[in-house]
Image (spheres, rainbow, N blue to C red):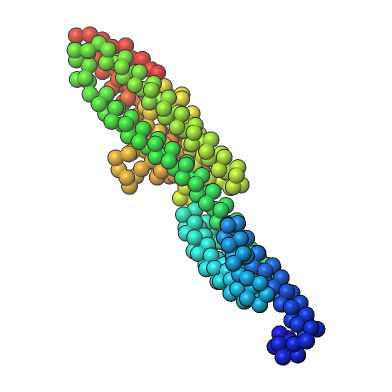
Amino acid sequence: KCAAIALAPLCPAGVRILLDDTAFELRRVDSDLRKYHEALGLTDEARMSFWSGRGFGLPALAASRKELQQQQHAVKLRIATAQLHMMDQWMELEVKEADQDRVLQAQSLAQERGGPIEELRALTVETARLEAKIEGRREIMKRWQQCRELESQIQDFEREASDSARLKGSSVTLLREEQSRKGFRRKKARLLEEILVKIVEWETQNAERFLHKGVAIREGIQQDLEETKEMGGLTLVGAFGSQHDDSVGSLGSLVAATAVSASGAAAGPLVSGPPLAASVAAAAAPVPGGSITMRTL
């Protein structure tokens, strides 16, 4: 059509047809271009720089078409990058294959409905949702790590407190140990409460259970918190397990204990460490030349 117009005699009517056609095409291209600018998040400054510098008439139309092609390529590249990022997020969150298929089907429907722009928008929403899940999970794991470090300190303390020779020449050692146990108990209970709050928030926001290695751990942490408050500090090393062997760390201990409970087996307390009787015996060990009254926290 444009070629036919270009061959028309340069009479006023032919010029008017050419100008009208150019203006119509320019409006169409500009409409598509604005959609791509919005989808790519171009700043107002960048948009104004293009609009003001493209000229008028046929030069403006040529510049807009070139810009549109560039933005279309940029959107395709952004889609490919977002898809790779989403796959990384799936791996970190251990998303099930069935859930992945549902997301891919939704992306395909978005592309059919609105082309590359709609597909990019759907991908942007999904990756943002996954990123929020990951950030929430990292916050939970951060506090979990703090609890692991605290229990490592507790284990070191209890190891030193199990030596009866520590009581020689000091009448305040047991009192200091009792105060230390109270401090450890308060810190551990506070961390466990923070973890529980974060898990509940995460589960509410995402409408799913918080899993670690495929096992829901909230109930195990709740049990550990209750036992930490009830046991009075006789043994404070709970569901987080041994800290000196990374292959059998706190996460593995809690996940294993929770899995046994969920499977219907006899689920014992999630508190590891020395038996209660041994702890009492060690704390009540006699001191040469005197006696000790054993107190619990």
Question: Which of the 4 quarters of the picture holds residue 268?
Answer: top left
Left or right: where 182 falls relative to 284 = right
Quarter of the figure with the C terminus:
top left
Q: Please name the residue shown 32% across and 39% down the image.
A: 243
Of residues 12 and 38, which is closer to you in this image? 12
Q: Is residue 211 shown to the viewer in this render?
A: no
Quadrant containing the N terminus in the rendered view: bottom right
In this view of the protein, which residue sits in the foreground, 242 or 258?
242
Please give the name of the residue rendered at 31% of the width and 19% of the height, measured from the top-left corner: 177
Residue 76, how many percent across, how many down? 55, 69
Count numbered badges in the picture.
0
Q: Residue at x 39, y 21 (%)?
A: 182
Instruction: Work out whether 230 lies above or below 137.
Output: above
Q: What residue sits 41% from the left and 25% below the top?
A: 185
Is 60 displayed left or right of 146 in the figure? right
Residue 210 image point, x, y percent:
53, 45
Q: Nearer the viewer, residue 214 or 120?
A: 120
As drawn, 4 above or below 250? below
Q: Which residue, as the protein is rendered here, is positioned at the far right?
A: 13
Q: Position of residue 93 (x, y in %)?
A: 49, 53
Task: Give above or below for 253 relative to 150.
Answer: below
Location of residue 108 (image quadrant): bottom right
Say which quarter of the image contains residue 120. Answer: bottom right
- Inspect this view and state whether residue 245 appears: yes
Where is residue 149 drawn, in percent x and y?
35, 36
